[in-house]
Image (cartoon, helix red, strand yellow):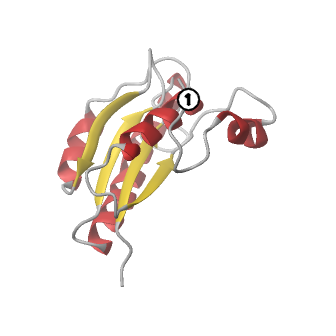
Amino acid sequence: AMVLEATMVCVDNSEYMRNGDYPPSRLDAQTDAVNLVCSAKLEQNAENVVGVLTAAGAHAEILETATQDVGHVLRALHAVRPAGALDLVAALHKAQLALKHRQNPHQRARIVAFVGSPLATPSSGADLEQRLPPPGRAPEK
């Protein structure tokens, strides 16, 4: 049997995403990759849902919470402009919160994070793990 999933995709919309090393820009290359990931998730199971949120700018912003239409995700992404610095921890917290409130509790919660800019902390992996609540637990305020 196919696994039921609710997936939140964190996109990097920091200033680094203006770089043209992945033509036409990192942001456009990321949009293509998000399209592939979301399309694959939605094709795996008719009841799967995907959502998308930005991880830079003034604050992490949820663009789409739970849709079965990849067109909704793409329309939301086309409006995203590079701004500010990446705050991956804040974005992951917000993604966890969105998944905590998913309509179908049988869906397994998944987060896919796209990172196209340097992480602020040198020990980012271990540090990030310590700053995130364990899966299945609500983030502390």
**Residue 1 to residue 90: above or below:** below
Q: Can you see residue 87?
A: yes
Q: Residue at x 44, y 33 (%)?
A: 94
- Residue 8 point in image, percent of width and height: 40, 47
Q: Nearer the viewer, residue 16 or 99?
A: 99
Left or right side of 139 for 122: right
- Residue 6 point in image, percent of width and height: 35, 56
Kind of residue sitting beneath label 1: Glu
Q: In what quadrant of the picture does the N terminus appear?
A: bottom left
Quick one: which residue is furthest to the bottom in this view? Answer: 1
Categorize mark 1 by other alpha carbons within 10 Å: few (<14), some (14-19), many (20+).
few
Q: Quadrant of residue 48?
A: bottom left
Q: Quadrant of residue 129?
A: top right
Q: Residue at x 39, y 41 (%)?
A: 28
Number of residue marks: 1
Left or right side of 17 for 65: left
Q: Can you see residue 25?
A: no
- Residue 141 point in image, percent of width and height: 53, 23
Which residue does the numbered mark 1 point to in the structure image?
140
Local secondary structure at mark 1: loop
- Residue 62 point in image, percent of width and height: 33, 32
Q: Residue at x 26, y 40 (%)?
A: 64
